Amino acid sequence: MEEKDLQKIENASKDSKNKGKALVSNKILSFCAYIGIACIAIALLLSACFKGNTNVENVFRSIGEVIAYILAMILAFYWVKSHKHIAWLVFYIIFVVTIAVLYILVVI
């Protein structure tokens, strides 16, 4: 009985560590999403206020888009990781590479 109790305690501590890591990563992702939305909002405000000068607006819009793309890629990775089929992973890689290459070619 003592071994089973020890195993239960060890499993409970592992679960609490995993929940702690998930909580920290959720906070980080939430903060990054907040920053991304702030950049997009600033870009939209600047485009409404300064219709002639779009350089500053484009910078904020680009930052917001990059943050949004990165967050979407991170969250999609966790989804793909949970669905252990190789096709999901292959398509995920194709999509991420396509987004990265096209963004670099079009924006930069």
Image: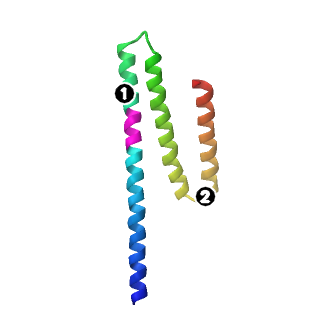
Mark 1, secondary structure of its residue: helix
According to the image, what is the colour scheme of the structure? rainbow
Magenta residues (range): 31-37
Place of residue 43 in the rendered image (x, y in percent of width and height, measured from the top left): 40, 23
- In the rendered view, tell whether residue 41 sits above or below residue 32: above
Q: Residue at x 53, y 50 (%)?
A: 77
Q: Quadrant of the C terminus?
A: top right
- Residue 81: quadrant of the picture: bottom right
- In the rendered view, tell whether residue 68 sits above or below residue 42: below
Q: Amino acid at mark 2?
A: His
Alpha carbons under labels 2 and 1: distance apart: 38 Å
- Residue 42: quadrant of the picture: top left
Q: Which residue is mark 1?
A: 41
Mark positioned earlier in the residue sequence (2 or 1): 1
Mark 2, secondary structure of its residue: loop
Any magenta on residue 33? yes
Crowd class of label 2 (few under 14; some 14 to 19; many from 20; radius 10 Å): few
Q: Which mark is residue 85?
A: 2
Front position in the image: 17 or 72: 17
Place of residue 3 in the rendered image (x, y in percent of width and height, measured from the top left): 43, 86
Q: Quadrant of the N terminus?
A: bottom left
Q: Amino acid at mark 1?
A: Ala
Front position in the image: 28 or 78: 28
Place of residue 87 in the rendered image (x, y in percent of width and height, measured from the top left): 63, 53
